[in-house]
Image: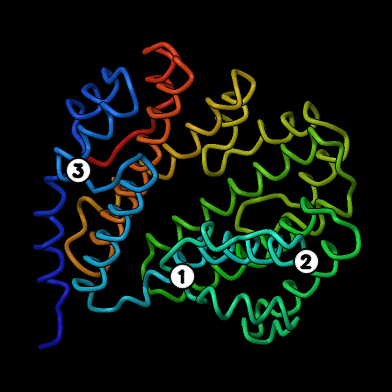
Amino acid sequence: MALSYEFSIGSVRTKEKNLFTNGDIEHMLACESEGELCRYLIDKGYGDGSDIEEILKSHSQSVWDYIRRTAPDFAVFTPFLYLNDVHNIKAVLKGTLSGREYAHLITEPSVFSADTLTTAVENRKFSLLGEDLSAPADKAYEVLAHTGDARLSDAILDKAFMELIIRTAEKSGSEFMAQYFKTTVFYNNVKIAIRGAKADCDRDFFENAICGVQDFPRTKVIDASVKGVEPLLDVLSKISAYGCSKAAEEYRHSPSAFERFADNTLMSLTKEKCKVSGDGADPITGYLIANETEKKVIHIIASGIRTKTDYQTIKERLREVYG
């Protein structure tokens, strides 16, 4: 029997009850060791494993398995899979050209299998990745193989995938999905611009790295980026779209505050649209994003435990959750 969105939405509303509460987060913040954090997550039924990464991988797999079983049209989630693909092709490309093992770096689910990526890179047969990605992937290969410039190679791939993600999201039929990924790409551009400005990258880098997205003044940002971080922040502070002016202010406070603001902007959009939606794929998408955000929260807490960071500092870095 074919799945219906009525069924899937009812199911996901029940699953939402297992998402993190403020009490869960406070309990994790109180953990004094990574082992204690692992035990709490296992006891809660979050996932299985001997360390944080294994538990997160276990949980992520169960979430994706659930979505495959529940969503009437799994293809709607393709933009999220591309986020894994761009990570994977970078790993395969660098591993192949350097002779280093990369299998443990592959993230799933994805559009392209590890075998497909390996064949594409080893044989330089990037037509296997389709028309949208073939030329950029070949260019990234060329750059890394002949100049060793991993930053530029990564940027070329990021731009190609971000452009593909926007187009795919716009075809999904979900207004939320289109807006969510426009916001994602907008802030991806901002992050690339800031990192490039800090590294004194030239105009050629920014032209290859920053893609076009609605309400993003690409030329102005590139012009400012080649001049340095402060000129760039001045330009960003004048952009109202996506809360960018506030994001620039947060960056001046600290880079981690900026990262938190960007993630919370996406979560606010998700809660606004998906928690109240009564049809289509948006409620399921909201549940997926909620779980991805919880993984970031666990990473931040685990990192704080390892570095013996104080409670208040860790708490200030945490992302807004869906629950």
- Residue at disc 2, secondary structure: helix
Q: Which mark is residue 67?
A: none
Instruction: Please indicate whether residue 221 sits to the left or right of residue 62 in the image.
Output: right
Which residue shows up at 68% across the image and 86% down it? 127
Q: Amino acid at mark 1?
A: Ser
Q: Is residue 73 visible?
A: yes
Q: In the rendering, at what x and y percent does residue 145 appear?
A: 85, 65
Q: In the image, is residue 221 above or below residue 108?
A: above
Name the residue tied to disc 2.
140
Are the residues tagged 2 and 1 within 8 Å (C-beta)?
Answer: no
Which residue shows up at 60% across the image and 62% down it? 162
Q: In the rendering, at what x and y percent does residue 153 appear?
A: 77, 59
Q: CA distance from mark 3 to mark 1?
A: 24 Å
Q: Amino acid at mark 2?
A: Ala
Instruction: Please indicate whether residue 24 sits to the left or right of residue 128 in the image.
Output: left
Q: In the rendering, at what x and y percent does residue 12 appear?
A: 15, 59
Residue 288: image quadrant is bottom left
Q: Earlier in the sequence, mark 3 or mark 2?
A: 3
Name the residue tied to disc 1.
110
Name the quadrant of the C terminus: top left
Q: In the rendering, at what x and y percent does residue 63 appear?
A: 26, 59
